[in-house]
Every structure is written in C-alpha cells, then in structure tokens.
Amino acid sequence: MPKPAKEPEDILPMLAFIVMTTVEALEKAYGMEVFEAIKTVQPGYAFGSVYTSLERLGWQGYLETELGDPEPVRGGRAKKYYKLSEAGKKVLAVTRKTIADAGRVAKPVLVLTPALALGGKGKRLG
C-alpha cells in the first residue's frame, strides 16, 4: 500500500521571514520596535508593510500577541507585543531549511544555466 502524501509545509514570503526572524531575535517586541530593527538592515520597507505583516502572521497563528499596560504617552493605549508561537517556530525552521536547501542547489544551477542556454555548447562541466 502506498504511503499517504505528506502535507506540504508552509514557507514564509521574504518580508514575513524578515519580520519573524526579527521577532525571534527580540523575543518579545512591539510593532515600532520590530520596524526600527528591520529598518537598520533593510531600509526599503515601510512601517505599514511591517505592521501588516505582523498582523497577518498573528492571524495565521505564527505570532502570539500580548497587550502591555496602558501608557499616558500613547493616549492611554497599550502596546501590542508579539512573540513567536509554536507554529511560528516550526514555519520559521521549515523556511530556513528551504533557504539552505536552495543555497545548496544554486551553484550547480548557475553553472548549468549558461551551458543549457547555449544548447550545451557552453562551458564544459566537470
């Protein structure tokens, strides 16, 4: 009897991966803190993109949220803190493995691509 097909694992899109990695590094962080950390290494992202990604990752169950104490500086509003859920840790590990696997095949693919584009008349492999 054949083995049942394994459910495909999710992998994160680039911004979600960056956001999740940042939350993991900070352990527990609020939106602006995540954005500021990302901005130092990837300045092209807008706050709205990062915040939307945080919210989406929460809806997907990859991040857990916790409200802090209300702050007078914030008009009595509380900060929402994010941390990785167990599902988030799993999807982050799967994404990292996928990236590592892709890195292992990238070099052979790059070597083969020009040879294949030239109909096999390019650089000799081996």
Image: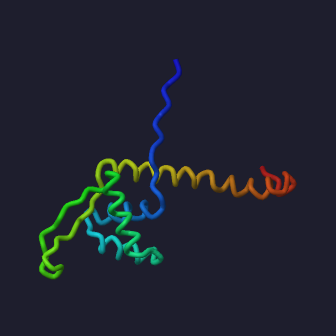
Q: Position of residue 104 (x, y in %)?
A: 59, 52
**Horizontal placement of 116 versus 32: left or right?**
right
Front one among 34 and 70:
70
Q: Position of residue 68 (x, y in %)?
A: 16, 67
Whether 85 is drawn above or below 69: the answer is above
Say which residue appears at 51% left-offset and 50% top-offset. 98
Front one among 92 and 107:
92
Give the number of callouts.
Answer: 0
Q: Position of residue 42 (x, y in %)?
A: 46, 74
Judging from the image, the colouring scheme is rainbow
Whether 45 is drawn above or below 110: the answer is below
Q: Which residue extends farthest bottom?
A: 73
Q: Position of residue 93 (x, y in %)?
A: 41, 50
Say which residue appears at 26% left-offset and 56% top-offset. 64
Quadrant housing residue 111: bottom right
**Horizontal placement of 67 versus 44: left or right?**
left
Whether 69 is drawn above or below 72: the answer is above
Say which residue appears at 62% left-offset and 51% top-offset. 105
Quadrant housing residue 54: bottom left
Q: Which residue extends farthest top?
A: 1
Front one among 57 and 22:
57
Say which residue appears at 79% left-offset and 51% top-offset. 125
Quadrant housing residue 113: bottom right
**Horizontal placement of 73 versus 82: left or right?**
left
